[in-house]
Amino acid sequence: MNKYLLLLALCVSTSFADTLYITLEKDNALAVVDGASGTLLKTVPLGQRPRGLALSKNGSLLYVAASDDDTIQILDTNTLKVIGDLPAGEDPETFRIHPNGRWLYVSNEDDNIVTVVDVEKRSVITEISVGVEPEGIAISSDGLWVVNTSETTNMVHWIDPRQQGITDNTLVDPRPRAAEFSVDNKSLFVTSEIAGSLSRIDVASKQVEQQLSFRIPGVDQELIQPVGVLAHPDNRLLFVALGPANRVAVVDIQKMEVIKYLLVGQRVWNLAFSPDLKRLYTTNGVSNDISIIELDSLKVTKSLRVGHYPWGITVKDD
Amino acid sequence: MNLLHAFIALKGIVTRELWRFLHQRERFVAALVRPLVWLFVFAAGFRSTLGIAIIPPYQTYILYEVYIAAGLIGMIQLFNGMQSSLSMVYDREMGSMKTLLVSPLPRWFLLTGKLLAGTAVSILQAYVFLVIAWFYDIQAPWHGYLSLLPALVLAGLMLGALGMLLSSFIKQLENFAGVMNFVIFPMFFMSTALYPLWKIKESSELLHTLASYNPFSQAVELLRFALYGQFNLYAFVYTLSCFVIFMAIAVWGYNPSKGMMVKKGGGPR
């Protein structure tokens, strides 16, 4: 009997459960999905036009940008109840939390600023003026750099968190959207929506080192609009959501070459890994679903309807 | 019916069919080239056509070549069934069929033997096709390749029985062209092999109805679900029923005194 209990315990301990939180832009709600089984668990009402979201450092709180309410809502991940708000400036869209767990950087598209919020005091630390239409935010894992992309200025703005100000700018391809640091923080990857390209910027020199243009046989070039980007912790692969091309590009980081294009739902926006790195999840805005990609085989195994206009996604390790 | 006698006869029929198949390498190549041309050339033009809806047994968006693969396995079996019927017309003209049919063994047994031999050949072709498709990134779960086998047997038997039924109606080899025009092509194009039912429904309700009742559609769906480790009960019952009906008519059709061989002037005078 004990033998069986031990076996059961081993099975339980080796199975990685994860919960996905997905903002539904049109439903004003949050979809909660069990990642391992790919099933929709529940939908929770939120503020208006929820988009960016992130978990607190210990996973107990979930921050969600309710863009049309000009606020970031705070949810308790156990009860999924809204327990408070953060001041976030006008129309908050994308945000990230600094590795210190305290500073939250959010882009305010209409005001051309990045607002820095203290999540503990629930107050604004400062507002940093950036280029026109700020969009993507990325923070290096060592906490030394925060970058913001501005869609119309076509720039990456380098913010030093110690000064809470811009120290450098890098010109990139038209309409930069998302940014992501490599695991070793030596490179920054930036997607450009109109150019249909990915730029690799050297963090030390702040210069564009390499560029990659996406080309999919049989797909109109205008439809290839790179948006979300995510680096695998093994520093070998990078995943890029290609918007209305309905594909995720798998990029070899060293060679800066596309290994494979994976067919997912329509207008793929954002990406997230499962904590055990077995799966990659994508939010597909127009087809109202998420796609689940098995990372070992690089195959799309399932697409699951979650609600209208799924936008942001974050994953909690259970 | 003596079991040993039956076994020897079955072995003779199957061996003859396999020998004939193995000695006709061009037939094997031709049987593979046809679906591969559809896969590499035809499907390439429609690559992203189906990327907008998820239909069972698929759980996510698929490229057209993934969709068409199951239909092309069906195509292999359809053409094989018809090829077998062609060879039976030939056998009848050459007299070897008459020799077979006058043996003391039951007619249904002899015809089933012919059918099994033809199905075995089509299964071999289907798996070779799947190996090539695998390298073209059309990959089903590994257990799907196992669960496909019984589906291939039933679909192969049903399509073979259909071919046998038709061969009992054909008086001369030359008439086989008619079978191509009036049976194979309509069956293939009016099925779910190339397009899913919801796509057909978008263009024509009539075509949708015809395609859903087409036995070939159900055979293809049986194969499609089996390839992904799933069982489609409706397609199974439909295919099995068609097999029984086609086989019964074929056995009757091959009755030298009552069937179509007499009516068409092919039977003994």
Image (cartoon, coloured by chain):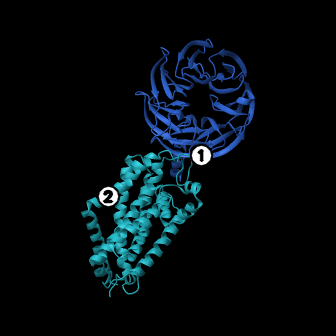
| Residue with the mark numbered 2 | B30
* Chain B tint as drawn: cyan
How far apart are the alpha carbons under marks 1 and 2? 41 Å
Return the residue found at the far left.
B23
Provide residue B40's location: percent of width, then percent of height. 39, 48
User: Which corner quadrant holds the C terminus of chain A?
Assistant: top right
Local packing at callout 1 (Cα closer than 10 Å; few below 14, some 14-19, many 20+) is: many
Q: Residues within 10 Å of mark 2 (few under 14, many from 20)?
A: few
Please give the name of the residue rendered at 43% of the width and 71% of the height, measured from the top-left corner: B162
Query: Which chain is home to disc 2?
Result: B
Same-chain check, marks 1 and 2: no
Location of residue B129 by image quarter: bottom left
Residue type, label 2: Ala
The chain letter corresponding to blue is: A
Report x, y in % for residue A299.
Answer: 47, 43
Say if mark 1 contacts mark 2, CB within 8 Å. no
Amino acid type assigned to the residue bearing label 1 in the image: Leu
Label disc, if present, on residue A304 of the rendered structure: 1
Residue nearest the observer in this picture, B217 or B264: B264
Q: Quadrant of residue A28?
A: top right
Q: Residue sitting at 52 percent across and 42 percent down?
A: A14
